[in-house]
Image: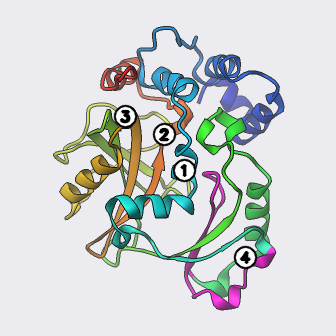
Amino acid sequence: MTKISKLIGRETLNSMMKLFAFIPDKLYLRLMYRVRMGKKLNLEDPKTFNEKLQWLKLYNRKPEYTAMVDKYEAKEYVANKIGEKYIIPTLGVWDSFDEIDFNKLPNQFVLKCTHDSGGLVICRDKNLLDMNTARKKIVKSLKSNFYWVGREWPYKDVKPRIIAEQYIEDSCVRELRDYKIYCFNGKAKFLYLSEGMENHDTARISFVNLDWTPADFRRNDYKEFEKLPKKPEHLDDIIMLAENLAKNQAFIRVDFYEVNNRVYFGELTFFPGSGFTLFASDEDDLRIGQMLDIEL
């Protein structure tokens, strides 16, 4: 985090951003880049990965992106591209929290809001679910428009809804590891592995090369894995599927899980970290940026 972010907190900063809805996207992004990254945003000749993501926010806008980031609509989009077998089953979809009939849900499930990245409730035991806390989190999320936080255009018109998904967990590691494939101009270049993301203190993130060796760049806002876990059995398939979904895209991150020897699609992301990722060094940001040709 920048000094300003550390001082007032990320959640407060995001709330402040929404107050500036009257500011045009380009000016807003220049201001926020200065606040979040502590430097000037170069949109005229972007070089770094973060700069190029900001450029894509402004100049790469296709109507289908709205469905691709909608956590409900994306399931159909992805199923049509790579097959239904990779989709986590949906247990229900609702417009409000009060519409949910929890008696009809299994003992374990996941609630997600379709339009943002914060409305998530993981229920491992329905008898222990704190209903008030879950309600407050979901209701708060439904009232927000994720677009205003980082001006990520695809989210602007996503209909706020709630979906329940089947709970999945790998029986061997008792965890859910996320394999996030970074695709540049249709080709996978690297991925990052994440685990324990419910809690920042326990979360682990490591960038990994496609041959499952540690990449030589990293973020400075999360702890890394001390040692890389075993290579997923279906990594080659995951990379192939990611590239299938990345066709004709300048940049997209495609997320998958491998659970009990099965591959599941997670989500599509056009702007990781909203283009404000704090890498360990400016050189890391620049080297990743060199992988992306935004003019194609």
Q: Which mark is residue 228?
A: none
SS class of the residue under badge 1?
A: helix
Q: Nearer the viewer, mark 4 or mark 1?
A: 1
Taking the spot 53% from the left edge, 37% from the top edge, the residue there is 62
Left or right: where 216 falls relative to 221: left
Q: Nearer the viewer, mark 3 or mark 1?
A: 1
Give the mark nearest the N terminus, 3 or 1. Answer: 1
Taking the spot 41% from the left edge, 69% from the top edge, the residue there is 87
Residue under circle 2?
270
SS class of the residue under badge 4?
A: loop
Asked if the residue under mark 4 is in contact with the one under mark 3, i.e. CB atoms within 8 Å, the reply is: no
Classify the position of the N terminus by image quarter: top right
Which span is picked out in magenta?
98-124
Give the mark nearest the N terminus, 1 or 2. Answer: 1
Residue 228 appearing in the image: no
Distance between the alpha carbons at the discs numbered 1 and 2: 8 Å
Q: Amino acid at mark 4?
A: Asp
Residue under circle 4?
130
Asked if the residue under mark 2 is in contact with the one under mark 1, i.e. CB atoms within 8 Å, the reply is: yes
Distance between the alpha carbons at the discs numbered 3 and 4: 36 Å
Residue 237 percent location from the top left of the image: 21, 59
User: Is residue 115 inside the magenta stretch?
Assistant: yes
Taking the spot 70% from the left edge, 85% from the top edge, the residue there is 102
Q: Nearer the viewer, residue 281 or 19?
A: 19
